[in-house]
Amino acid sequence: MNVLVAGSTGKTGTQLVKEIKQMGHNPVVLVRESSDTSGLPDGVEQRLGDLTDLNDDVCADTDVVVFAAGSGSGTGQEMTDKVDRDGAKNLIDLAEKSGVSRFVMLSSIGADNPSQGGEMAHYLNAKHEADEHLKASGMNYSILRPVALTDDGRSDNITLGAEVDKSAEASRADVAHVLAEAAVNGTYDGKALDMQSA
């Protein structure tokens, strides 16, 4: 199975790529010319692309797409809109046109109700629009909304759904694991789930 990963060089994305590879599948990493690919496994297929200006064939020959990208907390609202909202929506459209069977979205806690986001409202609204666009796409989808991210390792216990404590934390390793399960096995098809590490 070919799994296209957007955001593959980020802290969560690199772990996700490794998980997909360990599960016996072929991660295809979407990278910009300026991307630092040193954290990716050797021999991983790379595909040049920028979420603000994607080629129409970016999803060609892929079975699943995972959006694990983000504009970053240091960027302004304009870049949030370009990457987290418009980039995600464009990738969804291109995936659907290419016949991709499943799309997995890394979203954020609170994206289901962005008006409650306070200073995070703009970011959460961008994520909300992307999530809703995915739900309406017709593809199999999974949406994962983790709480505050940490760089801790894998935990033995992950909580998904209504029981999640929104003030808790989620390790990037756990997030990557759940995203890989969603992408490769379709474990969470049709679901939008909050997530925390125990």
Image: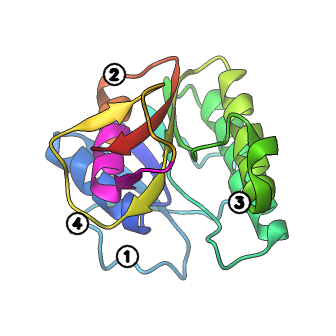
- Tell me the element at label 3: helix
Label 2 close to label 3 by CB (< 8 Å): no
Which is in the foreground here, disc 3 or disc 1? Answer: 3
Looking at marks 3 and 1 on the same chain, the residue that comes earlier in the sequence is marked by 1
> What whole-number distance in Å separates the C-alpha atoms at marks 3 and 1?
19 Å
- N-terminal of the pair, mark 2 or mark 4, is 4
* Numbered badge on residue 187: 2
Other-residue count near label 2 (Cα within 10 Å), few / some / many at <14 / 14–19 / ≥20 = some
Of the image marks 2 and 1, the number of the one nearer the N terminus: 1
Residue at 72%, 49% (x, y): give it: 124
* Among numbered discs 2 and 3, the one appearing first in the sequence: 3
The image quarter in which residue 123 lies: bottom right
Name the residue beneath numbered marker 3: 83
Residue contact at pointers 2 and 4, CB within 8 angstroms? no
The correct choice, above or below, for 7 with respect to 138 in the image is below
Which one is in front, 114 or 141? Answer: 114
Amino acid under disc 2: Thr
Number of the label disc, if any, that sits on residue 37: 1
Cα distance in 3D space between marks 1 and 4: 9 Å
What is the crowding at mark 3: few (fewer than 14 residues within 10 Å), some, or many (at least 20)?
many
Mark number displayed over residue 41: 4
State which region is magenta.
Answer: 167-179
State whether residue 1 appears in this view: no
Quarter occupied by the N terminus: top left
